[in-house]
Amino acid sequence: MPASLAIALLVVFGIVGVVGITVAIQARQTAGRRAQDAVRRFADGAGFTEELSATLDARRIVVRVLDTAATLPGVDGAIVHTLDGATAVTGVSPEEAERLAIAAPPDPNLRSAEITLSFRIDDAEPGASLVRRAVVVPLRAEGESFGTLLAVSRSTTERIPDASVAALELLGRQTGPALDNAHRFAEARRLADLDSLTGLANRRSFHESLTRECARATRYSRKLSLIVFDLDDFKSVNDQHGHLAGDAVLAEVALRVKAAVRATDIPCRVGGDEFAVILPESGSDDALLLSERIAKSVATKPIANVGHASISAGVAEITEGDDSETFFNRADAALYRAKGDGKSRTVAG
């Protein structure tokens, strides 16, 4: 090859190489600007902080956080692990999320931690799109942890951009207080639904649950049964032993009811010494069996300082045309028949 041609080719390829490097640098700079623009739009997003604060539904907050994290440049998926053991994901499989159950270090000053993941050759199938990197962000409020946000990347070469990491940290600072508010509301609502003496659903919660279950059973043609029962001769307990002893009896009976019912049943204290159990997806035969199980649990073992107790119960199964009021009245009427028939028995209405 003539020397002049060789020199010309070297010059040409040198220019091409320089152009390629220049294009690559420009592409990287453009990508960086896009990342910064996306993060700026996120940080300045209209009402995002207000949007998180406006809802008291923890599930909705988590979904919004996942969707937002997944849109950041360099982020291929996101995971939220909460302290109650729940996990929510986007862009990753449940199996990956289980393997990536990474808690943020307890340091209260930690904003985020970057993790690089490596795999043994026999664990990584050729061409598999594995999670290679993760940014772990604590979700805290008032010094208390409410979980962890993980943003993941499958890139084998690129880190999650610094601008995206900064946005994830901002997202974590917004999410912690929002989850705190949601949990406080949920706890207040839970306590408002419970009878303070027995820990069972209270009268208001009972009627709300019965109305909801009646509507569901009617809409989907499902079975629904109800047990209403009270303690036989409970007035004499208060008269002979005092109201504190009476309260102790009610609390003990509630414990025995909780132990007897199924996970799907809804035990309630309707008022005084009157209790009820709502049985979704169950017919009257199931209700009769459960009523007898509760009666046996109450009667078999004496209650301290009072002795043995017994219950009378009425059972009803929802029928066509029933609403919550007529349904309850049929079970309640059956209870009064049980009392009139000699007590310590269950009657179907």
Image: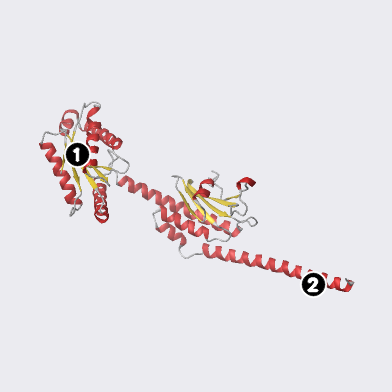
Question: In the rendered structure, which amino acid carries the disc numbered 2?
Answer: Val
In this view, the residue in front, 284 or 228, is 284
Residue 264's image quarter? top left
Q: Position of residue 311 (x, y in %)?
A: 19, 34
Could you tell me if residue 338 is visible in this image?
Answer: yes
**Residue position marked by numbered label 2 in the rendering:** 12
Residue at the (24%, 48%) spot, across then down: 224
347 sits to left or right of 137: left
Query: N-terminal of the two: label 1 or label 2?
Result: 2
192 sits to left or right of 181: left
Question: In the rendered structure, which amino acid carries the disc numbered 1?
Answer: Phe
* 175 to 314, vertically: above or below: below
**Residue position marked by numbered label 1 in the rendering:** 229
Judged from the image, the secondary structure of the residue bearing numbered disc 2 is helix
55 sits to left or right of 72: left
* 203 to 258, vertically: above or below: below
67 sits to left or right of 160: left
Q: Position of residue 236 (x, y in %)?
A: 15, 31
Quarter occupied by the N terminus: bottom right
Residue 166's image quarter? bottom right
Q: Dot 2 surroundings within 10 Å: few (below 14), some, or many (20 or more)?
A: few
